[in-house]
């Protein structure tokens, strides 16, 4: 557990994505009494009306997320407090945000225009003249 935490703390910012309160509540459903451990920030979610009582350990909390966790009777821990409470990670659930959800990830993968590719091309604009001609629409010759 400590090895994994150390590895994740030393990751780049891209590899430490944030986790919303809604996702956190969904992942922690049925895990009463356990501490959620997120190596990254925890953000608030306006769509979640009723925040459940959670014990969360994270690198950062947004002000609103911290307020809504504390209001629900939960607690926000830092990693040094977690180390004092459970040094070997007993009674914790290690969670992670969506790493591949960045906008740039749309452009990675098979080249755009190749069959079975859903990769977005780098285009200057989204207009009629920009990558919307042959091969993209059946009304312009053919569609791949």
Image (cartoon, grey):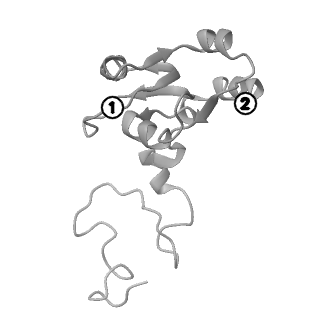
Q: Secondary structure at mark 2?
A: helix
Q: Is residue 100 left or right of residue 52?
A: right
- Above or below — where is 84 with respect to 125? above
Residue 123 vertical position relative to residue 28 in the rendered view, above or below: below
Query: Which residue is tagged 1?
Result: 51
Rendering coords of residue 11 (x, y %)? 64, 29
Q: Residues within 10 Å of mark 2 (few under 14, many from 20)?
A: few
Q: Quadrant of the N terminus?
A: top right
Of residues 55 and 102, the one nearer the viewer is: 55
Disc 1 to disc 2: CB gap under 8 Å: no
Q: Quadrant of residue 138?
A: bottom left
Dot 1 or dot 2, earlier in sequence: 2
**Element marked by disc 1:** loop
In three-dimensional space, the C-alpha distance between marks 1 and 2, rounded to whole angstroms, equals 28 Å
Q: Is residue 64 above or below residue 121?
A: above
The answer to which of 29 and 110 lies nearer the viewer is 29
The residue depicted at 31 percent of the width and 82 percent of the height is 137
| Circle count | 2
Looking at the image, which residue is at 46% across and 32% down?
18
Query: What percent of the width, then of the height, locates residue 103?
Result: 41, 47
Query: Residue at the spot x=45%, y=36% of the render?
Result: 24
* Quadrant into which the C terminus falls: bottom left
Residue 52 in percent (x, y) is at 37, 31
Q: Nearer the viewer, mark 1 or mark 2?
A: 1
Tell me which residue sits at (60%, 29%) in the image: 12
Q: Which residue is mark 2?
A: 4
- Left or right? Give the position of 137 relative to 79: left
Q: Residue furthest left?
A: 128
Q: Quadrant of residue 65?
A: top left
Q: Residues within 10 Å of mark 1 (few under 14, many from 20)?
A: some
């Amino acid at each position: 557990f400590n090895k994994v935490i150390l590895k994740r703390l030393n990751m780049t910012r891209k590899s430490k994505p944030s986790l919303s309160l809604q996702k956190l509540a969904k992942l922690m459903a049925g895990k009463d009494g356990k501490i959620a451990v997120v190596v990254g920030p925890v953000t608030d979610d306006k769509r979640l009306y009723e925040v459940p009582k959670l014990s969360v350990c994270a690198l950062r909390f947004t002000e609103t997320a911290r307020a809504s966790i504390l209001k629900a009777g939960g607690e926000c821990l830092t990693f040094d407090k977690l180390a004092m409470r459970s040094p070997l990670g007993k009674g914790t659930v290690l969670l992670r945000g969506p790493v591949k959800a960045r906008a740039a990830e749309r452009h990675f993968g098979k080249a755009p225009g190749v069959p079975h590719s859903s990769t977005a091309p780098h285009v200057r604009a989204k207009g009629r003249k920009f990558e919307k001609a042959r091969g993209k629409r059946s009304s312009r010759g053919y569609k791949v």
